[in-house]
């Protein structure tokens, strides 16, 4: 398993800083990750994102995580989600060029889950969407309620920002195929439990094809 630093992933507002986690053998798919809210400290290095990306590599999936515009070395400025969705599409474009013909998975955490899941169900190239602590009561996730794209959610039972009851209510409105994992005692950032996020990702997606 190796990690490449990509300093100049082309984005609509300038270059995007990115990391590519590669499995030991030839990848069977490529997952693109969006990170938590840029104005609240979210980056591609957020621990739960890191653990989820490493889990992808362990199950044979290349994981492309990147900083949204204005974060770290990525150029541009925060754009309230509109530009960040464009950044995510640019990352999908890069992944498609780097790994032609491989299935692509759209994944993200918190704010990044909203970006990834909504872009993912709209983009025909995305074979599935994965949301870690998706803020379903704060952003518009309506497009997922009519999508038959496979949908996976990992959430903390003790999430202090997005109550798990809101997640269960949202999940009940989603069409199949879908799967939800709730991690006991975990808060929004899965503090002290980020390794369990990686394990959940492995369990959910190790056999997905």
Image: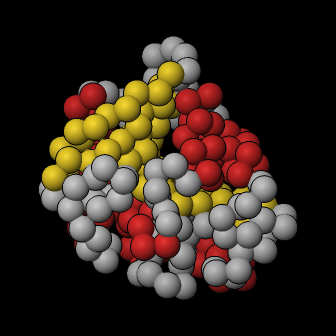
Q: Residue at x 71, y 52 (%)?
A: 194
Between residue 165 and residue 146, name the one nearer to us: 165
Residue 139 seen in render = yes
Which residue, as the protein is rendered here, is positioned at the far front? 73
Quadrant housing residue 143: bottom left
Q: Is residue 161 above or below residue 47?
A: below
Number of disc labels: 0
Q: Is residue 20 left or right of residue 209?
A: left
Q: Is residue 166 above or below residue 101?
A: below
What is the x, y in percent for residue 84? 30, 64
Quadrant housing residue 156: bottom right
Q: Residue at x 46, y 16 (%)?
A: 26
Q: Residue at x 55, y 54 (%)?
A: 46
Which residue, as the protein is rendered here, is positioned at the far right? 185
Q: Is residue 27 left or right of residue 188?
A: left
Q: Is residue 78 above or below residue 105?
A: below
Quadrant housing residue 181: bottom right
Where does the N terminus fall, quadrant-wise? top right
What is the x, y in percent for residue 68? 33, 58
What is the x, y in percent for residue 78? 29, 71
What is the x, y in percent for residue 100? 27, 27
Q: Residue at x 52, y 34 (%)?
A: 209
Which residue, as the protein is rendered here, is positioned at the far top? 25
Coloring applied to the structure: secondary structure
Between residue 61 and residue 192, name the one nearer to us: 192
Residue 85 seen in render = no
Between residue 38 and residue 163, name the one nearer to us: 38
């Amino acid at each position: 398993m190796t990690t490449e630093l990509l300093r100049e992933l082309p984005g609509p507002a300038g270059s995007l800083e990115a990391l590519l986690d590669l499995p030991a053998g030839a990848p069977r798919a490529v997952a693109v990750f969006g990170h938590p809210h840029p104005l609240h400290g979210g980056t591609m290095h957020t621990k739960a994102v890191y653990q989820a990306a490493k889990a992808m590599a362990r199950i044979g999936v290349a994981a492309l995580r990147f900083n949204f515009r204005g974060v770290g070395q990525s150029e541009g400025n925060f754009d309230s989600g509109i530009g960040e969705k464009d950044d995510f599409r640019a990352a999908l474009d890069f992944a498609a060029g780097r790994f032609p013909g491989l299935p692509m998975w759209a994944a993200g955490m918190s704010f990044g889950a909203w970006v990834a899941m909504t872009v993912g169900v709209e983009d025909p190239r995305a074979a599935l969407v994965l949301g870690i602590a998706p803020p379903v009561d704060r952003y518009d996730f309506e497009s997922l309620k009519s999508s038959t794209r496979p949908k996976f959610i990992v959430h903390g039972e003790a999430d202090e920002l997005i109550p798990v009851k809101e997640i269960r209510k949202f999940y009940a409105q989603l069409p199949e195929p879908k799967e939800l994992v709730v991690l006991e005692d975990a808060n929004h950032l899965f503090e002290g439990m980020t390794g369990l996020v990686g394990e959940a990702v492995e369990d959910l997606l190790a056999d997905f094809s």
